[in-house]
Image: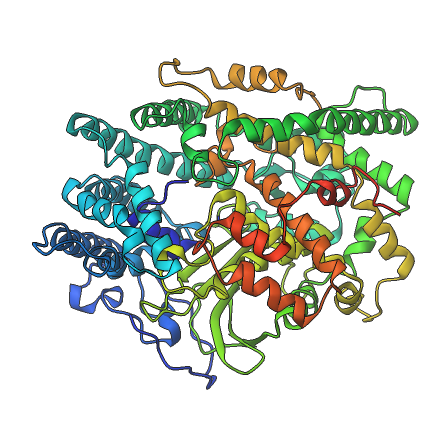
Amino acid sequence: MRLTLTASLVASALAITACSEQPTQSTQQTEQPTPQMTESTPAAEMNPLMKASSLQYQAPDFTVIKTEHFEPAMREGIKQQAEEIAAIANNSAAPTFENTIIAMEKSGALLARAAGVFYNLSGTDSTEAIRELEGKMAPLLSAHDDDIYLNDALFQRVKAIYQARESLELDAESLRLVEVYYDHFVAAGAQLTEAQKTTIRALNEEHAELTNEFGQNLLKMASEGAVVFASEAELAGLGSDQLAIAAAAAKARGLDGQYVIELTNTTRHPWLASMDNRDSRQKLWQASAGRGVSGELDNRPILTRLAQIRAERAQLLGFENWASYQLNSSMAKKPEAVMDMFASMVPAVVANANKEAAAIQAMITKTGGDFELQPWDWEYYAELVRQDQYDLDEAEVQQYFEFERVLNDGVFYTMNRLFGITMKPRPDLPVYHPDVKAYEVFNEDGTSVAIFYGDYFAREGKRGGAWMNAFVPQSKLLGQKPVIVNVMNIQKAPEGQPTLVSYDNATTMFHEFGHGVHGMFSDVNYRTLAGTNVSRDFVEFPSTFQEDWAKDPQVISNYAKHYETGEPIPAELLAKVLKSRSFNQGFDTLEYMASALLDMEWHALSADAPLQDAEAFEQQALAKHGIDIAAIPPRYKSPYFAHVFAGGYSAGYYAYMWSEILAADAFAFIQEKGGLTRENGELYRKFILSVGNSRLPADSYEQLRGQQPTTEALLIRRGLTAPAS
């Protein structure tokens, strides 16, 4: 993925898929109230974003930041960085590493600070005012980005340093920084003619506007697409906690006495597994799968134009298509490598999926059903098959996975045993919502590492999914320690009741904290190379690696305890839970692969290809790869595929599978070396988590493992092959 300087400032501050250091403050005070956003316009000198926060590690002071502060701060930030860049480009002195590369690295402090806070909140606490400002800022930031990377005088300075880099006696990280900057300039179009630069500027501006519009539509869909049910009878099979959540969601919309199920970001909804009423399941599934295809929120014209714009940009930059352009700087390097990876798996995955479908159809017949398996039936009857095969009741399982215990005695416990870190609550630090908790992270020797925010619960205005961001990225040059946030969308139990989570949600908590430590343990000089600023097909490796600690015997025995009695999960039940993890893997893998291949097909289009019919294109793409199974739709259909049409994963959704190969191989290696030990944690921290993009990801992996990965551990992890005896 191309990460330009402006994008780097925002991405560093936002990390998946950013002035001086403040002294440690550990005195705890009373919790600060959540700030109320008002709409008046303050004078610039009263804007708290105009200067670095006085809180520890420049953590944002949410007690004073208001919505109206963002626009003037970001506009002034653009102006200041433009002046800084002009001074660098027009410097009469010969270009040096210090007066060009380091000067660029230090530029844009105000923009990074303001945009870092703004774009975090736009994903977690979106309002109409924030959404409007996103639309307004998107073309401005795009133009600012182009003003930097299409500046020929600036590029000539960078090019001169790049060409002389081997004779400059730079340390390895500085040499890497020069190469990364040069690659960014070339990838942005610095070598284009002036006419071509004018064209790409226009394409970039339109692209920024359309990706923003696509994302805004998704937020509206989440609210307007929620499904209303008139009675509890329609929701037979749901647990009391789920009914309470649906009733509370209805009450919040003024629908007292009714029930509202809010959509998740994926095609399937987890509650489908429990809903006895087939008509209700169909209603919920169709609301999920039918998003973004009608009315004002029709995303199809947007996504087809986005695919076309990307192809046109790629052609200008000398690539056959957008996938080739994006993968040029990845571990995979070429789209063919991605296609080959999936092609090698399709026969086995489809065979497993068909076997699962047959078992589900048999269960439909066994339980008196006289109909053919449909997508809205899969989760429900798959759960019956799982109960039959494993005698497993999901409601019973969840009683042993209470949220606070999973977090503290699971995730935090594991990180302590592996890395020696402790998580100290910091109620004195302001948060942006009452559900968010702040922590300070300490090394085993007592030194402070980072500030961490946990934002785990679903709410109105938060986009779906789970992610890690950075309010402040790590940088020795800038004297910055990291300020990191994990975000999820767990349905919070009503007041006074414990929040029980699925085992899948528990593993996701481990996953996101894997991204968290990737940001918090970063130990590099330069912001551009810090933490998660790595290629898309490497960034999911550290997070996926952490997932498997959730089932480690030592770990799970510490946190999987009954929420009322505190009794550990019975060994027999635990064995069923772990064994059942390989159940339905044909479905899980195929719905993911369908989305990943859709992503690659959209971005394999050439610049001269006409605008596509979205539905027809999807059907043809799935049929082409032999994965057009009606009962297993893609995890994300194109009109709500946020990863690739609103986020940064275009031609990159494959990265989850690619990274899982690395993660499974590395985890197996660590197990061979003794598993959950401080020695292994330090090894992993040293070679993977601390180095960011300061060296090639493949080199980092080989430093840890001693060799490149194989797929053997991945197949075992997914239950597609048996481990060697």
Front residue of this view, candidates 491 and 339: 339
- Left or right of residue 544: residue 43: left
Side (left or right) of 204 relative to 536:
left
Relative placement, left or right, of 628 versus 609 is right
Q: Is residue 542 visible?
A: yes
Residue in front for this viewpoint, 308 or 427: 308
621 is higher (above) or lower (below) than 667: above
Residue in view at x 55 percent, y 20 percent: 618
Residue 691 versus residue 438 in the image, above or below: above
Q: Residue at x 87, y 50 (%)?
A: 576
Image height of 620 relative to 654, above or below: above
Residue 264 appearing in the image? no
Residue 257 place in picture, x, y as percent: 63, 46
**Which of the two residues, 349 or 153, is positioned nearer the viewer here?**
153
The vertical placement of 602 against 80, above or below, is above
Which quadrant, please, contains the N terminus? top left
Q: Point out the residue furthest to the front here.
A: 167
